[in-house]
């Protein structure tokens, strides 16, 4: 097979670097990884975690020392964009193909997956995926199996087979929809045997197989086929009339969309978390808006998706809200009353779908809540167990929208039959994969806003929460400090764990905006940690009213306003929550030169008690952590405060850590991480029935004992 070397494409990205490939020459597996990363980098070619690639090459058999043909193929659960050599499964080709001799038919094909392990060449391999035989039974050295929207649009069209034949003049084969597995691999081989000159195969409603004799030939062949599909769709878009039947309603302006989404997200999150606490994602991408605002939405949305990868992550169909784009969302009780029947109807629909399609050995019904929620005029929400899964679900449903747009442009969109969809969603092999997933971390599914979290104690708390599975809103009133923290969190955790907001706790607009960031990024807030602070140490005669106002504005009023706004979010969700106030041993201990700071800390402590007494009915716990002398990376200890305390105690500034440690019962220096651990103790699940408590983390200061 030969392909034309095309370096310029309109609908896909040509990323091949000849110099880089030359460095890998002679190592077919390295070239496979390189090609896979390039394909995965362009979401128009395949989606996150979707598709698989392979190569076949000769290698020395470790048992006989003889050359044997080995196939390296993307292993189970990997992602092409980030895949490394360790993400591949390596199998003896002859052993894999010999499994045909014991294959008992399509009713028993799932049992073949366990037999792949008897074909393993490299014992350190990733587990082989269900798609392994689809690559193994084809003879080509390099093979790409992708899920490009442009190809699936044709594959999911009512006339997809005819369009494929006409578009490629018979050089692309066609295999009707069938669940991936051993039998589909045999069908691919049969299609090739009957059409030996084809350059690829279209899988009905599923995706595309393309190949080449070298890594580069396979790459170019893949791009050319997808480019042709995309160009065909572009040429025909509009021929049948407006896309999706034209616009039924206009989207709100962007700012208004974001306002509505931020107001609604916590309420939706509460409904979607009736079985398990979920994390949300919101998008108002133009492609999404075109679909949800269209005349065809009500016809197409219930059909669901076609590609198995899309369907597994988005459920059988989305929930389309009946709210007006500019709906008044201020009356939360009325809003919940309006939404409750919609969620109940969806849960009933999903239950009926399960009951009508289940088989004798089907796994138990899973969460009946929707994953995808469409709000015409505003955007799309997705909810899942973590941010990455919610974000990827949104990406997959956007892929499904692209597929529907393309299929409708050239023919008529067709989705998977309900039974076929169910057999994939509740496939025993998929269930086994779910059961192998790691146990959730203690704070998985929870969202924390920690004030002053760009440094010091606040940053330590935010990192501890992120380490334990939470999503965090990192914030500070210092833009430069916040930017440095953003870079640090991005490097350590990645984009799906945190969001940032400029936040001065004395400014109500900043507080409102920070919670909007939380709602749009993750769906709401469950944990509020009031950590932002400052210290002023002066004798009473030197203390000014401006000093006093600043201390009380930040420490007391700031704590009150941040808590008040957080409680509003928590009540919308109806999931309870935690408020943690980082106070001080100074709330309990009298010391010199400390009238303003100490009294403000005492006010913080009593405000915490008052909030705990009031919010128990909402299952919102309010607790206090009292640190003392936490010096590392804290702005409190910069400049005048440290000098003031050193002067008050008659020591040098550099002697303060040792001085504070020696006056404690345990003779310990207290770190920011110690305070973070105390916060986790309150929120990690073991103290869920504790509220109104004070936990001293000060090394033991007898005068600060609460009782």
Image: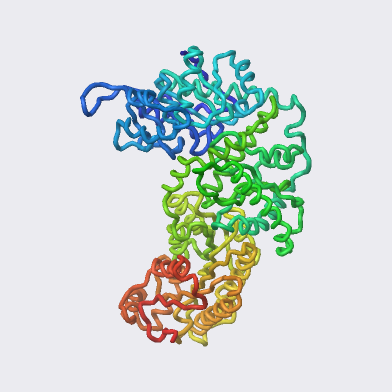
For image coordinates 52% across by 49% down, the residue present is 364
In the picture provided, is 506 more to the left or to the right than 126?
right
Q: Is residue 17 visible?
A: yes
For image coordinates 70% across by 27% down, the residue present is 237
Q: Residue furthest right?
A: 248
For image coordinates 25% across by 25% down, the residue present is 60
Where in the figure is residue 680, as x and y percent of width and height?
44, 66
Where in the figure is residue 622, as x and y percent of width and height?
53, 73
Q: Toward the viewer: 34 or 481? A: 34
* Quarter of the view holding residue 413: top right
For image coordinates 63% across by 23% down, the residue present is 160
Where in the figure is residue 316, as x and y percent of width and height?
61, 42
Where in the figure is residue 621, as x and y percent of width and height?
54, 72
Q: How is the image coloured?
A: rainbow
Question: Is residue 320 depicted above or below 134 in this figure?
Answer: below
Count of picture labels: 0
* Quarter of the view holding residue 559: bottom right
Location of the C terminus by quadrant is bottom left
Q: Is residue 25 visible?
A: no
Q: Toward the viewer: 677 or 654? A: 677
Question: Is residue 295 depicted above or below 495 in this figure?
Answer: above
Q: Residue furthest left?
A: 64
């Amino acid at each position: 097979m030969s392909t034309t070397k095309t370096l310029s494409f309109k609908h896909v990205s040509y990323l091949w670097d000849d110099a880089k490939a030359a460095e890998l020459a002679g190592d077919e597996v390295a070239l496979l990884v390189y090609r896979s990363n390039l394909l995965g980098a362009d979401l128009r070619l395949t989606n996150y975690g979707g598709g698989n690639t392979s190569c076949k090459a000769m290698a020395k058999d470790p048992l006989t020392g003889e050359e044997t043909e080995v196939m390296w193929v993307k292993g189970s659960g990997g992602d092409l964009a980030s895949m490394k050599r360790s993400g591949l499964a390596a199998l003896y080709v002859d052993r894999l193909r010999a499994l045909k001799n014991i294959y008992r038919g399509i009713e028993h094909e799932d049992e073949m997956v366990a037999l792949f392990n008897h074909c393993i060449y490299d014992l350190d391999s990733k587990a082989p995926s269900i798609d392994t035989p689809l690559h193994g039974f084809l003879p080509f050295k390099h093979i790409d199996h992708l899920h490009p929207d442009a190809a699936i649009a044709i594959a999911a069209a009512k006339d997809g087979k005819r369009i494929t034949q006409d578009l490629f003049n018979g050089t692309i084969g066609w295999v009707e929809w069938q669940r991936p597995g051993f039998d589909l691999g045999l069908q691919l081989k049969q299609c090739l045997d009957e059409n030996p000159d084809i350059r690829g195969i279209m899988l009905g409603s599923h995706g595309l197989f393309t190949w080449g004799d070298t890594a580069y030939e396979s790459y170019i062949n893949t791009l050319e086929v997808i480019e042709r599909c995309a160009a065909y769709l572009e040429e025909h878009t509009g021929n049948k009339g407006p896309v999706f039947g034209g616009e039924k309603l206009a989207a709100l302006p962007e700012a208004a969309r974001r306002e509505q989404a931020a107001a609604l997200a916590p309420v939706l999150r509460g409904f979607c978390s009736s079985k398990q606490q979920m994390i949300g994602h919101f998008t108002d991408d133009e492609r999404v808006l075109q679909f949800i605002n269209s005349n065809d939405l009500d016809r197409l949305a219930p059909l669901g998706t076609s590609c198995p990868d899309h369907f597994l992550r988005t459920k059988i169909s989305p929930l389309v809200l009946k709210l007006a784009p500019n709906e008044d969302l201020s009356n939360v009780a009325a809003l919940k009353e309006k939404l409750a029947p919609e969620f109940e109807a969806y849960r009933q629909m999903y239950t009926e779908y399960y009951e009508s399609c289940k088989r004798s050995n089907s796994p138990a019904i899973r969460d009946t809540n929707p994953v995808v929620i469409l709000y015409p005029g505003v955007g799309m929400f997705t909810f899942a167990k973590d941010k990455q899964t919610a974000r990827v679900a949104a990406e997959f449903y956007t892929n499904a929208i692209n597929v529907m747009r393309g299929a409708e442009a050239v023919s008529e969109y067709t989705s998977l039959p309900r039974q076929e969809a169910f057999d994939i969603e509740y496939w025993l092999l998929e269930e086994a994969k779910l059961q192998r997933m790691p146990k959730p971390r203690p704070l998985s599914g929870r969202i924390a806003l920690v004030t002053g979290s760009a440094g010091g104690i606040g940053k330590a708390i935010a990192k501890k929460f992120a380490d334990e599975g939470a999503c965090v809103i990192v914030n500070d009133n210092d833009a430069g400090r916040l930017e440095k923290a953003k870079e640090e969190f991005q490097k350590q955790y990645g984009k799906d764990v945190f969001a940032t907001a400029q936040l001065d706790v004395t400014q109500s607009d900043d507080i409102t905006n920070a919670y909007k960031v939380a709602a749009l990024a993750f769906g709401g807030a469950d944990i509020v940690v009031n950590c932002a602070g400052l210290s002023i140490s002066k004798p009473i005669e030197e203390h000014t009213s401006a000093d006093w106002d600043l201390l009380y504005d930040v420490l007391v009023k700031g704590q009150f306003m941040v808590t008040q706004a957080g409680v509003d979010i928590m009540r919308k969700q109806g999931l309870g929550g935690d408020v943690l106030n980082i106070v001080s041993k100074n709330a309990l201990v009298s010391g010199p030169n400390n009238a303003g700071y100490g009294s403000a800390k005492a006010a913080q402590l009593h405000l915490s008690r008052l909030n705990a007494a009031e919010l128990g009915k909402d299952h919102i716990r309010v607790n206090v952590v009292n640190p003392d002398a936490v010096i590392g990376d804290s702005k409190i200890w910069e400049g005048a405060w440290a000098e003031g305390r050193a002067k008050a105690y008659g020591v040098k500034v550099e002697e303060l850590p040792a001085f504070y440690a020696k006056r404690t019962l345990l003779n310990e220096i207290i770190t920011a991480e110690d305070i973070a651990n105390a916060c986790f103790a309150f929120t990690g699940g073991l103290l869920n029935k504790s509220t109104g408590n004070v936990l001293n983390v000060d090394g033991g200061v007898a005068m600060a004992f609460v009782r």
